[in-house]
Amino acid sequence: MGRTVTLIILREVEPCPRNALWEIFSFEAAKVFAGADTYRWRRDYHVPILEQIYQRYREVGIPMAYTFEDFKREWTRQKLAEMTPEERVRGLPPEERLRGLPPEERLRGLPPEERVRGLPPEELVRSLRPEDRLLGLSNEELVRLKDLLERRTSGQR
């Protein structure tokens, strides 16, 4: 009872998406590049397999202009593009998330009371001109402030 054996000659495989995996094993740099670029790995843990293939190519002296590092960079960019913003920043400390953002960007969208929460009053008014410090005070508050200033300048408490 004979069996039929299918022999695939990798160098003769037609370059198309369905043959991308075969191209990766072809030992021809251009085909390996094309196959690695086209093939869509179904599992993230398959990537180390490709790394081993590239390593083997290096060992036997097949020139590979497209390195595994190049592949990993492209693969990572592709995976990042598929992730939600929440998934991308998961695990990053707040300092890392904010690095490179100017202060205006960090505060955008926050109401004023949240922007100044936790700052002592002295810090809040330090950057204001004296006349700006009085803005928003009612007449009663201005009179009270005038009385406080007069007592303070006369030495009374």
Image (tube, rainbow, N blue to C red):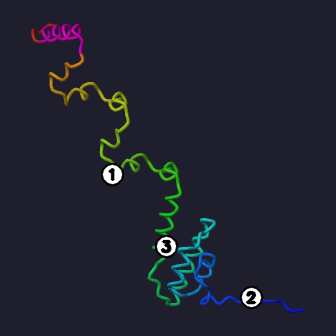
In magenta stretch: residue 144 = yes
Count every numbered label the image shows and give the total: 3
| Three-letter amino acid code of the residue under disc 2 | Thr
Q: Nearer the viewer, mark 3 or mark 2?
A: 2
Residue at horizontal 77%, vertical 89%? 5
Residue at horizontal 19%, vertical 18%? 134
Residue matched to label 3: 71
Which numbered disc covers residue 18? none
Residue matched to label 2: 6
Residue 151 appears left or right of 110: left
Give the spatial CA distance, label 2 vs label 1: 57 Å
Give the spatial CA distance, label 3 vs label 1: 27 Å
Which quadrant holds the N terminus?
Answer: bottom right
Residue 37 screen position, x and y as percent: 52, 74
- In this rendering, the answer to whether 52 lies above or below 105 is below
Query: Hey, which quadrant is residue 45 in on the image?
Result: bottom right
In what element is the residue under mark 1?
Answer: loop
